[in-house]
Amino acid sequence: MSDLEEFHHELIADIQGDADVLGLVTVEAFFEKVGELLTEAGELDGANRAYFEGSVSGNPARIDGYGGDPRDGDGVLSLILCDFSITDEVRLIHKDRLQVLLNTLHRFLKASLKRDFREQLEETSSGFGVADLIATTWKDIEKIKLIIVSNADSRTQADAAKVTDVDGKPVTLSVWDLKRLKQYMEQGQARANLVIDFEKDFGGGIPLLAASGAETSLESYLAVIPGKQLAAIYDKWGPRLLEANVRSFLQARGKVNRGIRDTIRDEPHMFFSYNNGLSATADAIEVEQGDHGQRLVRADNLQIVNGGQTTASLHAARKAFAEQLEQVHVQMKLTIVPREQSELVVPRISEYANSQNKVNAADFFANHPFHIRTEELSRKVLARGEDGYRDTKWFYERARGQYADERGRRTIAERKKFDAEFPRSQFLTKTDLAKFENTWACLPHIVSLGAQKNFAEFAKHIGKRWGSEGAAFDELWFRRMIAKAIIFRATEELVSGAEWYEGGYRANIVTYAIAKLVHDAEDREMVVDLDAVWRYQDVSPDLKAALLVAAAEAQDVITHPPEGVRNFSEWAKKQACWKGLEDRELSYPEEFDRVLISPDLANERAREARADKAVETSVEAELEVHRLGAAFWAEARNWARERGLLSPRENGVLETCAAIPSKMPSDKQCAIAMVALGKLRQEGYSETGEVDS
């Protein structure tokens, strides 16, 4: 069985499992899974389920979802069609089949602009909601992106292909087939088809100057790109041109920088002098030698890691200041980064480079200490298994593909052991974590914005907390965060199986319901007992009953917006929607009080847990100091003294450790010794006393 065939079977099994657990049809479960992937990959700001299947003038028309209000996304309307089928063999999609799928989606788009078509639809249906959104925002739409997602193997190149314009507005097609889904899910590679052909598609190559230093350095260049050309490239590829962290940054802070815009409008000839330029990376490039030096003619997977504001602003100026844009040139630092180094190198380039609005590395990067600590905790904190005997763990994936990589490099026997230790149901990502935490922070309208926008908001908060409260993100925090995950996933199942559930908007209902429960507990000056949920790795019947009450009310608020609001998904993104649910008085079962505890008790448990951990850490430090032995500490002491790396107190403690057993360091001294050793190792110290290269 080939790797693609194996992935095909695993994907179908995952979708069927999700559908069974959540009470969904398989194509809906498929949409939910790929919607998260498309959002994380930057193809969409968020994925909203909006199913319609019917006919237009006797021809089939269908849609499965859309990417949010185009007014919130640079005027880009994204429409999604799913092609999912359960088969033993991998299906193939050839050009004619792809054309049929494209036509059904394109037909729905055009029909949505006709009043008689919209009037045929039930006003409470999700199909009407998206058709009405298209019609009412049409004047603000500048570009349409049609996205086809399939669990078949496509045999045609169609990504970002041009499609027939609609009412003078450009339309492009993006295809995510089985190979592309596999590539992204296992390796985080969403941009396999992002090839910039400057010569063929964008008016010609750009001047290039080699800037690499030593042979061991990465291949680097300096380039000057016309503003008009950069704007055209962004017009075709959109946010996919921006490295994910920059993309999140722009979503959180707005698209167009006023200072950049004013320079384009008033002093375009000075743009090169005033602007800091771009920092970009690529997997590979093609260079030609011309009469006046080298020219860049092609770049594979070009990513702008700093300069997103500049790029977006130039694109915004295409219509308003087209004449001035002809005079604009932008400098670009281009680094060729092999894929195997990209996870480490690209975030550092983005972090260290200068830009008009510096991206805060503390907020977004997967290798930030917050994510690293969460990952470390997930690999060691034991949870109660389903049988009550075998312990399991929750796998936190801080970088896309970690889970698949960890599992894939094991033998079949080792995979069984891995699956028992890290069940697939106990897997979560950065965007999952942000969803759970922001729900608990009573921000369901922010969660409803979609995975990336919600993560950007969460990241700003965590970036601030990490500096002042980094120590608070410990094992107790991790256990309580997982309890929130358990509650969230249990609520998804409860909503799907509820008699009152009308179908659709489940993601919004779930986050609203939990936020309402948390809010109402706080009104009683109580909190949900997360420690009990962690202990049993399950949600009690009493808590489930209360969640169902809140969820039913959440559905009512979301599906009954104020007069004039027709799209429920967009309504759920408004603070006014949350305010409507927040202010409602609910009648919970009497048993609700059983799942609540006082904040004082929760804090007391936290103090006790952290005190126990401190004792445990102290004992571990004492054992490690004695295990390493006097000779080791003598060598470490000498190495530190030669370089003046430690304080007098730390030097004195190492002196005591070097005299074991004639002198016995106290438990406090052992803790100081281990901290000091950590400092030395950061400076390159190894057990041989040599500096690590």
Image (spheres, rainbow, N blue to C red):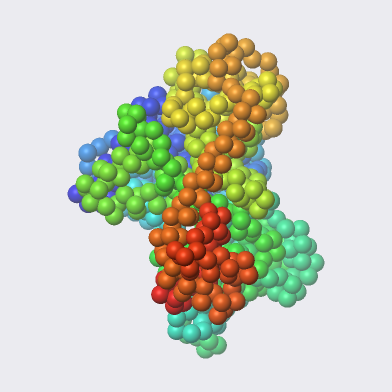
The answer to whether residue 289 shows anywhere in this view is: yes
The answer to whether residue 198 shows anywhere in this view is: no
Q: Position of residue 277 (x, y in %)?
A: 65, 70
Query: Toward which corner of the image does residue 334 lie, by quadrant?
Result: bottom right
Q: Residue furthest right?
A: 266
Q: Is residue 272 left or right of residue 337?
A: right
Does residue 76 sit above or below 642 in this rendering? above
In front: 115, or 648? Answer: 648
Number of residue marks? 0
Query: Toward which corner of the image does residue 320 lie, by quadrant?
Result: bottom right
Does residue 254 sit above or below 592 in this rendering? below
Q: Position of residue 158 (x, y in %)?
A: 41, 53
Quadrant housing the C terminus: bottom left
Does residue 632 sit above or below 308 in this rendering? below
In front: 556, or 510? Answer: 510
Picture residue at 47% right of the left edge, 65% below the top:
662
Q: Residue furthest left?
A: 1
Picture residue at 36% right of the left edge, 38% below the top:
392
Picture residue at 30% right of the left edge, 52% below the top:
408
In front: 200, or 659? Answer: 659
In front: 564, or 594? Answer: 594
Query: Toward which corner of the image does residue 675 lie, by quadrant?
Result: bottom right
Picture residue at 61% right of the left edge, 32% below the top:
604
Q: Residue furthest bottom?
A: 291
Q: Position of residue 89 (x, y in %)?
A: 22, 42
Q: Is residue 413 left or right of residue 266?
A: left
Q: Position of residue 518 (x, y in %)?
A: 62, 26
